[in-house]
Image (cartoon, rainbow, N blue to C red):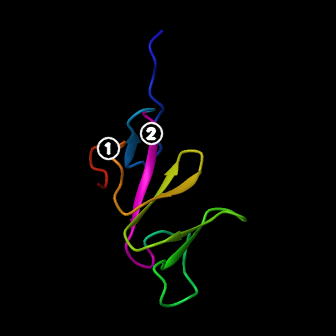
Amino acid sequence: MKETLPTEFESATHRIGVTGECVKATRWAKDGDHPLVVRYPIDGREYKGLLVAGEKTKFALRFGDWILEDAKGQVWVESQVLPDKYKALKGGAS
């Protein structure tokens, strides 16, 4: 039986190399780059934003961090360099 890759969702920009799962990757460089990010409330800190992924799930962000979202709506963060396991789809961000 031939294995099929997961289908792409409309806003997908990358595939995860091992699983073939499609994800949307957004690099957070400034306010307004992602709708779930709010400014970190304390000035003078390395972290400049908070990604509010759920009621109890928040990620601290630095400018240049990557926000990833899968087709199920799960959200997570990768550091400022997107790992090689994420392969850009044709026309996707890199």
User: Within the image, what quadrant is residue 82 found in?
Assistant: bottom left
Write down the residue under mark 1: 89
Crowd band around label 1 with a 10 angstrom C-alpha radius: few (<14), some (14–19), many (20+): some
Residue type beneath disc 2? Glu
Write down the residue under mark 2: 8
Question: At 43% across and 71% down in the image, what residue appears?
Answer: 33
Magenta residues (range) = 20-32
Q: Is residue 51 left or right of residue 54?
A: left
Secondary element under disc 1, as helix, strand or loop, is: loop
**In front here: 36 or 17?**
17
The total number of labels drawn is 2
Secondary element under disc 2, as helix, strand or loop, is: loop
Question: At 56% across and 88% down in the image, what residue appears?
Answer: 42
Residue 11 can be seen in this image: no
CB-based contact (under 8 Å), mark 1 and mark 2: yes
Question: At 27% across and 49% down in the image, what residue appears?
Answer: 91
Magenta-drawn stretch contains 23:
yes
